[in-house]
Image (cartoon, grey):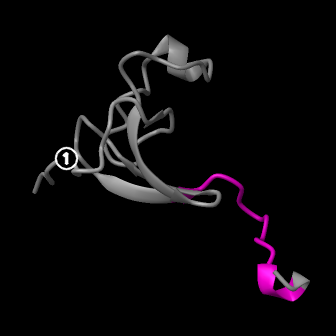
Amino acid sequence: MRLPIDPQADVARRAWLPCPVCDDARHCENCADLRTCGEHWRYLISNNGPVVHLQCPQCTHMWSVNTRPGVTRRDSSAFGD
């Protein structure tokens, strides 16, 4: 089932990460060289620190990914903030 495009989706907020479902960038030279591509971008719906929430405009799959795996967030309450 295809999801609708999220109402928070904005073409001005994009990310260039591979979609885990459609793999549409697999044969793209720009994507293979880790360069931004005019075709294979994702909507950046929101983020919570290093965790980004994305939607693929081609297949409409939504997912989240930690862009800094292995790095833990500091608890601001431990510093009296």
Provide residue 55's location: percent of width, then percent of height.
33, 47
Q: Nearer the viewer, residue 76 or 24?
A: 76
The residue at the far top in this view is: 29
Residue range corresponding to the magenta coloring: 65-78
Provide residue 59's location: percent of width, then percent of height.
22, 42
Residue in the image at 33% along x and 30% along y: 11
Secondary structure that dominates the magenta span:
loop
Residue 60 horizontal side relative to residue 2, left or right: right
Q: Is residue 38 above or below residue 42?
A: above
Q: Amino acid at mark 1?
A: Ile
The residue at the far right in this view is: 79
Q: Is residue 70 above or below residue 38?
A: below
Residue in the image at 39% along x and 37% along y: 42
Residue 65 horizontal side relative to residue 9, left or right: right
Q: Is residue 32 above or below residue 64?
A: above
Residue in the image at 51% along x and 38% along y: 17
The crowd level at tag 1 (other Cα within 10 Å; few <14, some 14-19, many 20+) is some
Say if residue 20 shows up in the picture.
Answer: yes
> Splitting the image into 4 quarters, where does residue 71 fall?
bottom right
Q: Nearer the viewer, residue 32 or 77?
A: 77
Residue 67 horizontal side relative to residue 10, left or right: right
The residue tagged 1 is 5
